[in-house]
Amino acid sequence: MGMRETYEEKVETRLKKLNAQIEELAGKADKATQEAKVKYDQQLMEVREQRDAVQRKFEKLQAAGEAAWKDLQSGMNEALDELKAAIGEAGSRFQ
């Protein structure tokens, strides 16, 4: 397996883990009081929008040629890190 395929596999794994964390937060939001649920749902919507943007970036990376792929790789890493931070921040508010 080449470096590119290995990297794409790692990204897919990270995205799956982040999606699982988002769904876990959604479960907590469902158990919240109505007033808190409104706030949590807004935060979840924002996190899901960010996740969708990361997914689109990943799809662009997968479709890119070799030269562009290397350029997109650092942006992909940054987008994943930002999504992870947003999920963590949302999760801390759900306590």
Image (cartoon, helix red, strand yellow):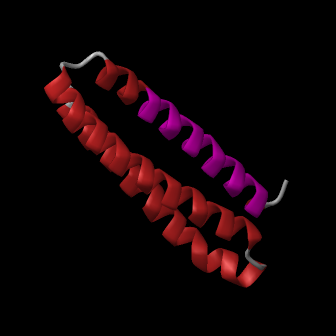
Name the quadrant of the C terminus: top left
Picture coordinates of residue 62, whole percent (x, y): 73, 65
Residue 62 lies in magenta, yes or no? Answer: no
- State the predominant SS element of the stretch in magenta: helix
Q: Residue at x 39, y 21 (%)?
A: 27
Q: Is residue 86 visible?
A: yes
Q: Is residue 94 left or right of residue 68?
A: left
Q: Quadrant of residue 69?
A: bottom right
Choose between 46 and 6: the one closer to the eye: 46
Identify the magenta region. 4-23
Choose between 43 and 24: the one closer to the eye: 43
Q: Is residue 16 left or right of residue 39?
A: right
Give the total of numbered labels. 0
Q: Is residue 89 left or right of residue 75?
A: left
Query: For the view shown, which residue lies furthest in the bottom direction?
Result: 67
Q: Is residue 38 left or right of residue 16?
A: left
Picture coordinates of residue 25, whole percent (x, y): 36, 29
Picture coordinates of residue 82, whole percent (x, y): 37, 56
Q: Quadrant of residue 60?
A: bottom right
Q: Residue at x 45, y 61 (%)?
A: 79
Picture coordinates of residue 80, whole percent (x, y): 47, 55
Q: Is residue 88 visible?
A: no
Task: State whether residue 67 is above or below residue 17.
Answer: below
Q: Quadrant of residue 16?
A: top right
Q: Residue at x 30, y 25 (%)?
A: 29
Q: Residue at x 76, y 78 (%)?
A: 66
Residue 5 lies in magenta, yes or no? Answer: yes
Query: For the view shown, which residue lies furthest in the left direction?
Result: 35
Task: State whether residue 7 is above or below residue 68.
Answer: above
Choose between 5 and 60: the one closer to the eye: 60
Query: For the view shown, which residue lies furthest in the top direction?
Result: 31
